[in-house]
Structure formats: C-alpha cells, structure tokens
Image: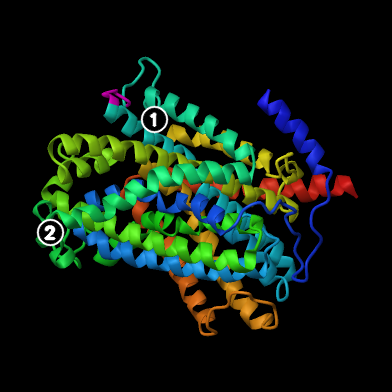
Amino acid sequence: MVVQELTNADHRASAEPHSAITTLGYAGSGMKRETGWWGAFVIGLAGTILVTGIAPVMVTSLGAAAIPITIFITLTGWLLCLFLAELAAMMPERTGGAPSYAAPAFRKRWPRAAKHINGLTAWSYWLGWFPVAPLNMILASAYVGERFGLDMKAGFVPIHTFIAWPTLIFSVIGICLLFIPAYKGIRFGTVFATVLALISMIPLTFIAVIWLFNPQTWHLAELTGFRHLDGSGFFTGMNGRSWLAVYLGYGFLLSWNVISMEAAACYLGECKNPDRDAKIAMNLEGGFGVFIYTLIPVAFVAVLGAEALSNPALVDPDTMFVTFAEKIFPGVAGALMSWLVAIALIVALALSALNAIMGSGRSLYQMSLDGEFPKFFSALNRHGVPARSMFFNVIASLIVVLMGGAVEIYSFSNVGYAISFVPVLIGYYLLRQDRPEMRRPFKLPEFMKYGALLLAAFYLIVWSVGGIVYSRIGQVEIYYWLGWATLAAYLPLYLYRVRIEDRRAT
C-alpha cells in the first residue's frame, strides 16, 4: 500500500518542472523550503550521534592515545562545516549536502570533467552515509538486548549468517519503520527529529559533563601522556607498524564518524532563509560536535581506566555507555541512569539512521537531476521529498545490515565518505579563484582558500593510506574491497543514464 502510494505520488510529482539553471550553471532542486536553521541542525545531529559507535571502539583499541587523534580530526570536521556554510549560502538551490557543491566549481575550467566529478562525488557520499542506518540499528539492538536480558547474538542453526538472527530482525524492522517519517517530508521529519534530538542529546550531553562533578569516580593519571592500553607511550607503534601508520589507519576509521556533523548541509537547500540559516546551522553543528567528541572519550578513559577498557569481560564496547553510567552513579541511581542512558542512545541511534535515509537520498536525487544517475531517482513525492531515492536507501541498508558489525561497516562505507570531500574542498578554492565576484552571504577570510586545499590533501592521505592500513589492522579487508566494488558500480549506472535514457529522450 505504501509502495503503491509512493509510486503514484512520484509519477505526479515528477511531471512538475524543477528550478531553472542558475548563473553557476547547475540545476536547482525544486524542493520545498519548509524548515530553518533549527531543522537542519537537529537532523544533522545524526553525525554527532555517531560518537555512540566510534568512541567505544577507539578507547578499547588505543586507550588514552585515541583522545588527541579524535580531537584533531573532529576539529577538521568543524572546519569542513565552515567551508560548507559558505558554499551552501552561495548555492541555496542545491540539495544533497557537500557533494552538490563540487561540480559548479569545476565547470569553468574543466566543463567536461565537471559532470563526472559531480556524479562520483555524490555517489561516494551516498556510499559514506547510507550504511549509518544499518549500523545504528545493530548498535540499538545491543542496548535493547542488554536492558531486557535478551541474547541478541544468538544464532539460528542450521542457517548461518554474519549477523545474529535477533539483531537482524530488530534491524530490519527499525529501518523499515524509519522510512515513514522520511517519506512524510522535511516538515514532518524536522518535528520527528526534534523530538528524538531532545530525548537523546540532552542525556548524551549530560553524560559528557556530569562525571566532572564526581571526582571520586575519575583518575586524571589515566590521561597522563595519552598512553596506549598496555602503558606504552603515544609515539609507540603497534603490531609491527609505526605510530604514524597506526594513527593514519585509525584516522580512516574516525573520519567516517567525527566529520559527519557536516550532515546538516544536506537540508540547507530546504531552509527558508539560507543566507542566515547556513552559517548558524553549520557553526552550531561543528561546535557541538567538537564538544561531544572531545569529552566522551576523555570521560571513558578517566572513569573506566585502561585496565577495564582492555578487558572485554569488564567493558563491552557495544554497551559501554551503560557501563559508564553505572560507574558514575552506583546503586539505585546507577540503575536508573543506566535505563535513561540506554533509552536515550536507542533514540539517538534512530535519529542518526533517519538522517542516513533522508540525507543521502537527497544526494541521489540531485545527482539524477544533474544527469549522472537514472531518471527514476529524479522524482519528488507529494510531500516534496525524493521518496524513490530514500526507498532505494532502505533496500541498500537491508543488504548492508548483513555485514553484522561496526568495524566491518566502517571499513566498507568510508571507502566513499572520506574521498567525497576532496573535490568539494578543491572546488571551494576554485570558486574563490575563478568567481570572486559571486555573492557570498557568509564568507570566510581570503586565506582560508589555502586551508581548503590543505584539508583536501589531509583527507586524501587518510583515505588512501589509512584505509589500506586499517583494513589490515582490523582484519576487514574483504569489506574494504567490497566498498571499492560498490564505488565502481557508479559507472554502469551512469552509462545507463547517458547511453540509454538520454538517447531515448532525443
């Protein structure tokens, strides 16, 4: 019934004309402007919520040594948000976030290459974002199981899967249910996301700071020298690899999470006043992201300690936030807080999964409008959102959930995510050089154009070197190369559009 309504509504909406070509030579999205900076901010909190998955992995792998690396790469994410705020205010007709700003920048110097840059950047970004939905449902199932004493990791003999059947069933139901608010449009999605954000982010912020007011539970000596779990120094290698190689590898893992606060940019094209809303939403998103991604790892190390973090029998990364709450609040208060934290995290993970379905769907939609993806994805439903693209995300998520775990999905997905920002940042530099006269409601200092190039180079190194290193450290090479295979799937989809659909239309 829902699928039939989706199809009929899409056919009606697809007949409506989209926005005209703008002065920068791109097609506008034609989407409704029904939100403001608050809507972009709260839905974009999905990126900050990814701390629930990465912080436990980092501190149980590197101990206190994870803290400086996390802070540094998170700061680059805030810087990325500032670049995107300027680009979004320049191109308020675009949707889909960061990748939609790349092609217009390249069109003046390399017009033939611009369309491929546009398509590959958007496809890479899609690969980076849609797996958030299956990952978060897997993590949410762990908290549900922990709270209700359910064995979410039980197998089902004789049929074997890479993911336990209870977790699989929970994840599939959750992903399908989240399609409903996504389908209803940005106004409904904003209300839904605001409720989820308040329920989840207030307790998460509380967790980030409350431990500071209970000195008996934490030990600053655990942070001294930012040592590894085995007590070795920060500049010590691991498993026969140099410290630089190790941190590049874990930097690859981190970048999938800590720069994802940029997700707010996906909705700036639906803001009523993008001149104002872009800078407010992106600055708030970046600042809050740095706050959360800094204090949570520090709290874990200071309160739980290296000995516990290195012992899976004492600390389970999948439910570490509950363990942390029980340590801060012993007794009855701890039991109550553990329930509040678990509920908040389940809600937070749902919010982040909702954004994954909505945001990356807009990237596919814009890519289709621009002529690099099948026309099927270029329709809006009666609520003014790209329902077909989002439904495609749901199907893809149901496949990826079979991978079964966080590091597997991180390694698969970040093959696309980290590299997607390189053309965008280079494009920022080109727009400053080639189009200095363009209207910029929000403008960074002129020297920042060189900062964009440096940041692009850094992300390229983390993606290219760090990806290979971590795939071996984490023994997830098969998932890493599956990511490459998915990235390569852009080519047949692009060829179908230009050699079959476009020729059929002429």
Is 431 left or right of 453, judged from the image as shown?
Answer: right
Q: Residue at x 21, y 58 (%)?
A: 238
Is 127 left or right of 8, judged from the image as shown?
Answer: left
The residue type indicated by label 1 comes to: Phe
Q: Quadrant of residue 349?
A: top left
Query: What element does badge 1 sit on?
Result: loop
Q: x and y percent of residue 261 in the render?
A: 46, 57
Residue 23 located within the stretch drawn in magenta? no
Q: Quadrant of residue 95?
A: bottom right
Q: Locate the N terminus by quadrant.
A: top right
Q: Give whichever of discs 2 and 1 has the lower sequence position.
A: 1
Q: Quadrant of residue 9?
A: top right
25 versus 158 height, above or below: below
Q: Which residues are magenta?
A: 148-152
Q: Residue at x 36, y 17 (%)?
A: 156
Q: Residue at x 9, y 62 (%)?
A: 221
Q: Residues within 10 Å of mark 2 (few under 14, many from 20)?
A: many
Q: Which one is nearer the viewer's eye here, 394 or 252? A: 394
* Dot label at residue 222: 2
Q: x and y percent of residue 504 in the render?
A: 87, 45
The residue type indicated by label 2 comes to: Glu
Q: What residue does disc 1 label?
A: 162
Residue 149 located within the stretch drawn in magenta? yes
Q: x and y percent of residue 23 in the render?
A: 78, 71
Real-space Cα distance between discs 2 and 1? 36 Å
Can the viewer see residue 135? Answer: no
Can the viewer see residue 350? Answer: yes
Q: Which one is nearer the viewer's eye here, 504 or 189? A: 189
Q: Residues within 10 Å of mark 1 (few under 14, many from 20)?
A: few
- Depth check, mark 2 against mark 1: the one in front is 2
Q: Which one is nearer the viewer's eye here, 440 or 240? A: 440
